[in-house]
Image: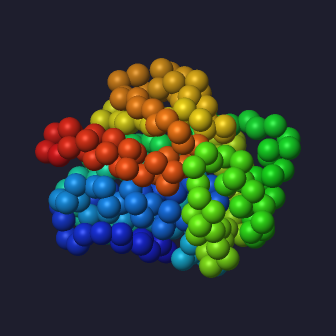
Amino acid sequence: MTRAAVVERGQEHPDLGVLIHGFLDRGRSWGALARSFPASWDVRALDLRGAGRLATSEGPYSLEQAVQDVVDVIKQADARRVARVGNSMGCLIAELVAVAIPEKVAALVLLTPTPLGGLELPAETRELLRESGGNQRQQRLIRERLSLRLAPEQIEQMTDLDGLMGKDAAHGYYDAFSQGHPLGKEPSQFKGATLIVASTSDPSIPLALVQQIRATRFPDSSLETIDDSGHWPHVEQPVRTGKLVADFLSSIPGG
């Protein structure tokens, strides 16, 4: 079954921006960034199964299923060009979609990207993240620990009970991004225009790790950094992040 997208702005434009959220998040966290897209682009912020408007949707909660759901949305949109934007775990899905339908994807934007090859975390961090499904207090604590500038009202919005990711989805997605995908062991198969954005104060995906991802997997990509931000630069520093994305999209052929 094709999963619905949350349309943030625009109708029937030939270019489509598709935004994919990270672990424990939901589509509406992209609100500020969606508004930064050039006016010629449709922008759709998707909810993955088990999150946001699809919080009660059944799994599987896996990279493969998420990729298929996003591919279905893109094919139904019948856009001329598609830009894929992911944050954290959403970067894995964004890249795999670009590999699956390269003829549709004109550009890839990866914000604080989790490595496609997997991410091994300390036991205490693993327990905190993997077992946070359905636990509002624990999910708020995660935002507080991994961010630098999230205001209390932003944390409240990101973790309200309406759309909170539950236990099964948290287990499935944590296992998916921590184990990674075999394609992450080699240079990316996507050869189109790519922008990678790192946060200099992200405690979970540090700048050195993002630099390694670029060097080994996306050597021809552009790398930009966001100061004074943690793991969610599109929420913590939306103006700066939005300008980077808008400038990048304007620079690609036809942009």
Between 220 and 196, the one nearer to me in the picture = 196
Residue 52 location, x and y as percent?
57, 72
Residue 233 location, x and y as percent?
49, 46
Quarter-of-image position of residue 6: bottom left
Count every numbered label the image shows and give the total: 0
Q: Is residue 14 left or right of residue 166?
A: left
> Against 4, is 35 above or below?
above
Outermost residue to the left: 254
Residue 27 location, x and y as percent?
49, 65
Instruction: Tell me the residue at 75%/57% (across/down).
Output: 141
Between 204 and 153, the one nearer to me in the picture = 153
Instruction: Tell me the residue at 71%/61% (across/down).
Output: 140
Q: Is residue 156 left or right of residue 4?
A: right
- One can see residue 187 in this view: no
> Against 106, is 190 above or below?
above
Quarter-of-image position of residue 139: bottom right
Q: Is residue 12 left or right of residue 197?
A: left
